Amino acid sequence: QVQLVQSGAEVKRPGASVKVSCRASGYTLTDYYIQWVRQAPGQGLEWMGWINPNSGETNYAQKFQGRVTMTRDTSISTAYMELRRLRPDDTAVFYCCRGGIATPVYYYYGMDVWGQGTTVTVSS
Amino acid sequence: DIQMTQSPSTLSASVGDRVTITCRASQSFSSWLAWYQQKPGKAPKLLIYKTSSLESGVPSRFSGSGSGTDFTLTISSLQPDDFATYYCQQYYSYPYTFGQGTKLEIK
C-alpha cells in the first residue's frame, strides 16, 4: 500500500542538527511533492516547505529559511529534511507528507499520505 | 502570511448531532482550502480539499463549503469515530498556513 515511513525519534542538544528521512513505498516518489509539517507538543500544525523529488526544487517557509534543507535520493525513494541550529522550541513531531502532483506542473490538493511522524527533542 | 482562525476552539456534541466548524482567513481567496482530522498520537488525515471536494474513502457525512474569507466543515451526523481535532489549511499563498484546530469532544 501507499505509505511514507520515517526515521526514528531523535534527541539533540541545542545548536545541533537533525536529519529526518522519509521513505516512500507503493508509489513513485518522483510523481508527487513531499511536504514537511511539524507539530510542537500540544500545539497545531506548521508547514515547513516542500521538495519536488523529480527536480530537487524546494520551497521553504520564510521562518525556516537558512536553517532547513530538504533533499531526496530517488534511487532509494527517500526524502530528507535537515534542520540546523536546533533550539528547545524546535522540539516537535515532524511529518513528511505526500502533497501535490509533480508533473506536468505542481498541483496541490492537500496532503493525502502522511508519515508516522518523527519526534525530535531538543534539550540540554 | 494568511492567518487562519478556527471557531470554536472546542466543541462538545453528541452522537447523531450535526456540527459545523468555521475557518476564517485574514484575506480573501478562492477554493484553496483543505480540512484534516487528527486523533491523539496519530498523523492528520485529509478529509476535504479545494473547499468542498471529498477525499477518497472519506464518509459522505463530511462536507465543506465557503469562499472568500469564510469556510466551513460540516459533519451531518456525528459518529463515535469523529471525535478528534480538526484543522483547516489554506494553500492559496505561501507559507501554507493552518488554523489552530478545533477539538470535537463528546458531550
Image (tube, rainbow, N blue to C red):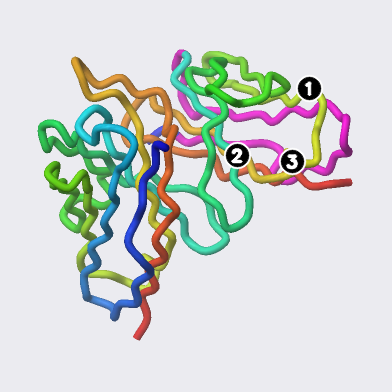
Give A84 or B94, whichever is nearer the viewer. Answer: A84
Asked if disc 3 and disc 1 are in contact, CB closer than 8 Å, the reply is no
Q: Amino acid at mark 3?
A: Asp
Same chain for the residues at labels 2 and 1, yes or no?
yes
Q: Are marks 3 and 2 on the same chain?
A: yes
Q: Which residue is painted at 12% across and 44% down in the image?
A: A75
Whichever of callouts 2 and 1 sits on the residue coming sooner in the sequence is 2
Q: Mark 3 or mark 1, which has the lower sequence index?
A: 1
Please, what is the three-letter code of the amino acid marked with disc 1? Ser
Name the residue that disc number 2 marks. B37
Residue B17, numbered label: none
The range drawn in magenta is B3-30
Write down the chain letter for disc 3. Answer: B
Write down the chain letter for disc 1. Answer: B
**Secondary structure type for disc 3:** helix
Residue corresponding to mark 1:
B76
Q: Which residue is mark 3?
A: B81
> Tag 2, which secondary structure?
strand
What separation in Å lies between label 2 and label 1 (alpha carbons)? Answer: 15 Å
Report crowding for label 1: few under 14, some 14 to 19, many 20 or more residues within 10 A (C-alpha): some
Please state the horizontal and vertical placement of residue B52, each as a whole percent of the image: 57, 15
Label 3 crowding class (10 Å Cα cut-off): few <14, some 14-19, many 20+? few
**A8 relative to B70, above or below:** below
Give the CA distance from mark 3 to mark 2. Answer: 11 Å
Mark 1 element type: loop
How far apart in space, not on screen, are marks 3 and 1 (Cα)?
Answer: 13 Å
